[in-house]
Image (spheres, rainbow, N blue to C red):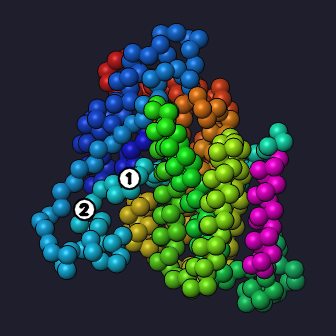
């Protein structure tokens, strides 16, 4: 998956626009990356690792210049409205967010619930913290997942009262809380790597962009579900407290062991995939009737390039695929040396048929993936 969010767009007009701009994008953005690759020893010496070779990690950058139609006073400007999310796309169509995958129908269904084997003490520690956190959260929220009803013939309301099913309100509260916390790790990692790059005055090997993209992607999940329910003041205070504690703990932990933190996030995303898989299963089984025909929020249709008649179920499938991407990326990054290795996903990412069925790239696979990415960009420049 070449890192341009419009390449898999569902709408023909968007796809056509992508085709027209693809050449200039590759030259201005991705080939800004490969321009340096043509002079690196990577493709001339097989014994040089593309993960650690110098000048092989210049991130692809996309230049988005858009002109607003006319100007207006602050009183009438659409940009000053409280809900600018829904007004800006009407004024300017295109990429108003960082890179994020847009999935085909077959990719959305390719996700599998996977668990990574815990091999080291650090892996077991990271997994243990995630499992403990989920167990406590399930206990506090009163959620008990069962494959079958404890007693035959129980109605949806009876199952909800007994805690075996979540109501649509409880699902939203659960999702909103989780997404408000899930956007923290990527921003912490990006911040620390950004400061390290400034302090040491050297390139970052492509990690900052991927971490920022993950943080924004999780935030967009939150913004999407916020359109369905406005949290109470008490709920917001809970999020504030949890976010403050988690941010500082993760900040310190990432300074001590970035590898362990990425492994922790990988296991956290495993749980997120489980959560959304169960939510989708409940919805498709008719156990969340309030959402059966609920239209997808406008923000989600623009963000994931959903069709105009998309439903909330389509949004859940897209969000689950995003969480699967984070699962795969973080487990793969945890297998690398964060001080010397290139981020293999700085230029492109595998599609969901890979990320949804494979838990990670080991270091050798990441190295091979970097080589393939370089060859693709060289080929696009006509240097076979």
Residue 229 place in picture, x, y as percent = 52, 82
Q: Earlier in the sequence, mark 1 or mark 2?
A: 1
SS label for mark 1: loop
- Residue 232 seen in the figure: yes
Residue at point 75%, 71% (across, down): 137
Residue at point 82%, 39% (across, down): 120
Q: Judge from the rendering whether residue 377 lies leftward or rightward of residue 163; answer left or right.
A: left
Using the image as rendered, state which of residue 67 and residue 112 is in the foreground: 67
Q: Judge from the rendering whether residue 192 lies leftward or rightward of residue 174; answer left or right.
A: left
Alpha carbon distance from label 1 to label 2: 17 Å
Please rate how many residues cluster around mark 1, counting C-alpha atoms within 10 Å: few if below 14, some from 14 to 19, many from 20. Answer: many
Above or below 99: residue 227: below
Q: Read off the residue under disc 1.
A: 9
Write down the region rendered in magenta.
124-143
Q: Read off the residue under disc 2.
A: 92
- Image quadrant where one finds the C terminus: top left
Please rate how many residues cluster around mark 2, counting C-alpha atoms within 10 Å: few if below 14, some from 14 to 19, many from 20. Answer: few
Residue 295 place in picture, x, y as percent = 46, 76
| Magenta-drawn stretch contains 126 | yes
Outermost front residue: 199
> Which image quadrant is residue 302 in?
bottom left
Q: Judge from the rendering whether residue 380 lies leftward or rightward of residue 111; answer left or right.
A: left
């Amino acid at each position: 998956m070449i890192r341009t969010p419009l390449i898999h767009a569902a709408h023909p007009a968007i796809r056509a626009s992508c085709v027209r701009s693809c050449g200039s994008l590759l030259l201005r953005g991705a080939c800004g990356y490969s321009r340096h690759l043509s002079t690196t020893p990577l493709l001339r010496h097989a014994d040089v690792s593309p993960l650690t070779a110098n000048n092989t990690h210049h991130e692809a950058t996309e230049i988005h210049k858009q002109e607003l139609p006319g100007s207006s006073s602050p009183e009438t400007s659409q940009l000053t409205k409280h809900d600018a999310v829904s007004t800006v796309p009407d004024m300017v169509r295109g990429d108003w967010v960082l890179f994020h995958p847009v999935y085909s129908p077959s990719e959305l269904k390719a996700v599998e619930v996977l668990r990574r084997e815990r091999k080291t003490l650090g892996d077991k520690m990271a997994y243990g913290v995630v499992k403990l956190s989920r167990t406590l959260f399930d206990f506090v929220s009163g959620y008990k997942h069962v494959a079958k009803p404890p007693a035959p013939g129980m109605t949806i309301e009876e199952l909800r009262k007994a805690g075996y099913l979540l109501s649509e309100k409880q699902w939203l509260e659960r999702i909103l809380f989780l997404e408000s916390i899930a956007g923290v790790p990527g921003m912490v990692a990006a911040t620390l790597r950004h400061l390290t790059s400034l302090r040491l005055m050297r390139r970052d090997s492509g990690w900052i962009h991927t971490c920022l993209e993950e943080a924004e992607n999780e935030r967009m999940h939150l913004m999407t579900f916020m359109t369905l329910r406005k949290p109470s003041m008490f709920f917001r205070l809970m999020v504030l407290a949890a976010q403050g504690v988690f941010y500082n703990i993760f900040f310190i932990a990432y300074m001590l062991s970035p590898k362990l933190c990425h492994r922790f996030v990988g296991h956290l995303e495993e749980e997120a995939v489980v959560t959304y898989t169960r939510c989708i299963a409940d919805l498709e089984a008719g156990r969340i009737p309030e959402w059966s025909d609920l239209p997808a929020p406008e923000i989600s249709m623009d963000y994931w390039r959903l069709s105009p008649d998309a439903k909330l179920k389509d949004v859940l499938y897209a969000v689950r695929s995003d969480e699967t991407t984070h699962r795969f990326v973080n487990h793969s990054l945890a297998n690398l040396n964060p001080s010397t290795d290139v981020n293999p996903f700085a230029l492109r990412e595998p599609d969901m048929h890979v990320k949804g069925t494979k838990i990670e790239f080991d270091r050798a696979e990441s190295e091979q993936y970097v080589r393939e990415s370089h060859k693709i960009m060289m080929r696009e420049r006509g240097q076979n």
